[in-house]
């Protein structure tokens, strides 16, 4: 069996311990050498006698471990670079905006409920449902006009957490694919974003209902 692979991997251990002091070009060259060695090891293993297969398995595993060390180091350096260059997020400002937008949506729903309570004789559950439907319809119209996107940019999560966010996700998908036609565009893509919400929301509701029923 060729001992060159053993010698290369042993000599490379010292290089791996010096990654922090190596230039990017040297690290790239080291990674390239590891990739070439991996290919050579696989080819050598394929042509080696059966009694030497386990030795090559060990060499390939060691090669992969050395490659992982280099990849992990590069990933760490990349994350540090992103963290240092990325603009800091105005958390307090964004939180206030989300609170204002989300609160305003809830206020509108409450106003609808108050109006229906005073001017109709409908039941409370019916009024609550109509208020939710009103928010959904209003959001759908604003999304179609391109206004709700601007509200979303300003309010962030505050515009998405209420039921208006669900309506926006449905209409946005339909608007995006409307050029593909009513069936293959709007019909097929309208629940692209909202589909998982409906699916897992329904499953969760069934499970919670079963738990409540069995516990009663």
Image (cartoon, rainbow, N blue to C red):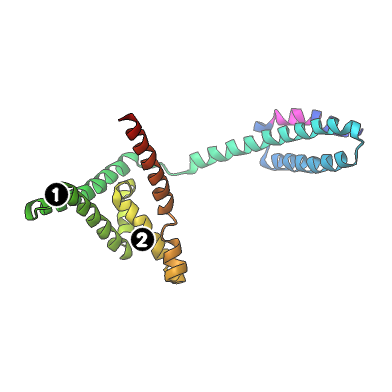
The furthest residue to the left: 118
Residue 112 highlighted magenta (yes or no): no
Q: Is residue 16 above or below residue 145?
A: above
> What residue is shown with label 1?
123
Picture disc at residue 171: 2
Is 28 or 118 nearer to us in this picture? Answer: 118
Give the number of marks.
2
Range of the magenta residues?
Answer: 11-18
Residue 191 position, x and y percent, is: 42, 57
Query: Is 158 rendered above or below residue 188?
Result: above
Which of the 4 image quarters holds residue 119? bottom left
Q: Which image quadrant for residue 24?
A: top right
> Observer-nearest residue: 23 or 145?
145
* Nearer to us: label 1 or label 2: 1
Q: SS of the residue at dot 1? A: loop
Say which label, 1 or 2, has the lower sequence index: 1
Looking at the picture, tell me which residue is in the foreground, 210 or 169.
210
For the N terminus, the quadrant is: top right
Is 120 placed left or right of 38 in the picture?
left
Secondary structure of the residue carrying tag 2 is: helix
Question: Which residue appears at 79% of the width and 40% of the height?
Answer: 38
Provide residue 91's location: percent of width, then percent of height: 34, 40
Residue at image coords 25%, 49%: 101
Mark 2 closeness class: few <14, some 14–19, many ≥20 residues within 10 Å = many
Q: Can residue 3 be seen from the camera position used here?
A: no
Badge 1: residue crowd in 10 Å (few <14, some 14–19, many ≥20): few
Q: Are marks 1 and 2 in contact (CB under 8 Å)?
A: no
Q: Residue at x 19, y 47 (%)?
A: 125
Residue 84, x across and y down, in percent:
49, 39
Q: Quadrant of residue 9?
A: top right
Looking at the image, residue 211 sits to the left or right of residue 13; the answer is left
Where is residue 124 shown, x and y percent of the image? 15, 47
């Amino acid at each position: 069996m060729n001992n060159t692979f053993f010698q290369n991997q042993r000599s490379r251990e010292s290089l791996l311990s010096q990654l922090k002091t190596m230039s990017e070009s040297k690290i790239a060259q080291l990674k390239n050498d590891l990739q070439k060695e991996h290919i050579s090891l696989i080819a050598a293993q394929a042509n080696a006698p059966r009694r030497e297969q386990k030795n090559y398995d060990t060499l390939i595993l060691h090669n992969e471990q050395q490659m992982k060390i280099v990849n992990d180091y590069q990933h760490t350096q990349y994350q540090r670079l992103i963290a240092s260059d990325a603009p800091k997020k105005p958390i307090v400002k964004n939180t206030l905006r989300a609170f204002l937008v989300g609160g305003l949506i809830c206020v509108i729903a409450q106003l609808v409920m108050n109006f229906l309570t005073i001017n109709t004789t409908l039941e409370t559950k019916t009024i609550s449902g109509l208020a939710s439907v009103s928010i959904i319809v209003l959001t759908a119209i604003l999304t179609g006009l391109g206004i709700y996107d601007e509200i979303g940019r300003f309010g962030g999560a505050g515009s998405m957490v209420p039921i208006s966010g669900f309506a926006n996700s449905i209409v946005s998908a339909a608007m995006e694919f409307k050029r593909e036609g009513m069936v293959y565009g709007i019909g097929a893509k309208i629940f692209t974003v909202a589909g998982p919400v409906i699916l897992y929301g329904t499953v969760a509701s069934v499970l919670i209902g079963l738990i409540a029923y069995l516990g009663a």
